[in-house]
Amino acid sequence: MANPPSGGKVRGISACLLGIACRYDGQALPHTEALRAAAGGSLIPLCPEQLGGLPTPRPPAQITGGDGEDVLNRQARVIDEHGRDVTKAFLRGATETVTLCKRLGIVEVLLKSRSPSCGVGMIYHGRQLVKGDGVTAAMLRRHCICVICHPD
């Protein structure tokens, strides 16, 4: 397999940043620089929520009782706006994302900020941003895969 143009690093990216309509609201958030990098073959799109079996569109969800690390430790849950517990789907998506990263040799992932799945460093609790990682970001860190927050 030839090395990608990213200097030998295989990198992943939240699929919504490449223009794939996979966000909870059925939208995408295409980012010009990400699209340019992907055109060079250096980025692999990942959507943990879809990998976990959630539909698109889907009700928005938030972590309750902590952050992604707490969800991994079974001390917090992910609940959608209708009160439905979607923790299993978020955990499955995070696990599948790590599996893909390991199989494809992905060493770092650029993630969509503030998401209960992909958020790096800050996630929403209600309408407020609080410190913490999303479920997938926390799991990637546990597996020594570098996570980078996409600046909004």
Image: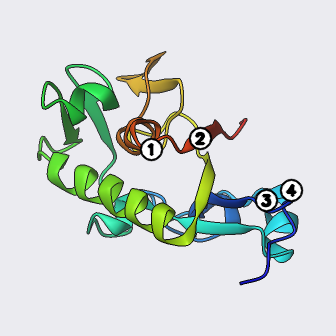
Say above or below: 119 vs 122: below
Question: How far from the left and from the top, in percent, is residue 82?
Answer: 16, 45
Mark 1 vs mark 4: in front: 1
Quadrant in the rendering for residue 8? bottom right
Marks 2 & 1, CB-CB < 8 Å contact? yes
- Secondary structure of the residue carrying tag 4 is helix
Query: Which badge, 3 or 2, comes first in the chain's sequence?
Result: 3
Query: Which badge, 2 or 4, comes first in the chain's sequence?
Result: 4
Say above or below: 150 vs 50: above
Q: CA distance from mark 1 to mark 4?
A: 23 Å
Residue pointed to by mark 2:
146
The residue under label 4 is which amino acid type? Glu
Q: CA distance from mark 2 to mark 1?
A: 7 Å
Residue pointed to by mark 3:
34
Quadrant in the rendering for residue 112? top right
Please tell me which residue is depicted at 86% across the width and 59% down the height of the picture: 7
Residue pointed to by mark 4:
33
Q: How is the image coloured?
A: rainbow
Marks 2 & 4, CB-CB < 8 Å contact? no
Say above or below: 83 vs 32: above
Query: Which badge, 1 or 4, comes first in the chain's sequence?
Result: 4
Residue pointed to by mark 1:
140
The residue under label 1 is which amino acid type? Leu
Q: CA distance from mark 4 to mark 3?
A: 4 Å
- Secondary structure of the residue carrying tag 3 is helix
Please tell me which residue is depicted at 23% across the width and 41% down the height of the picture: 81
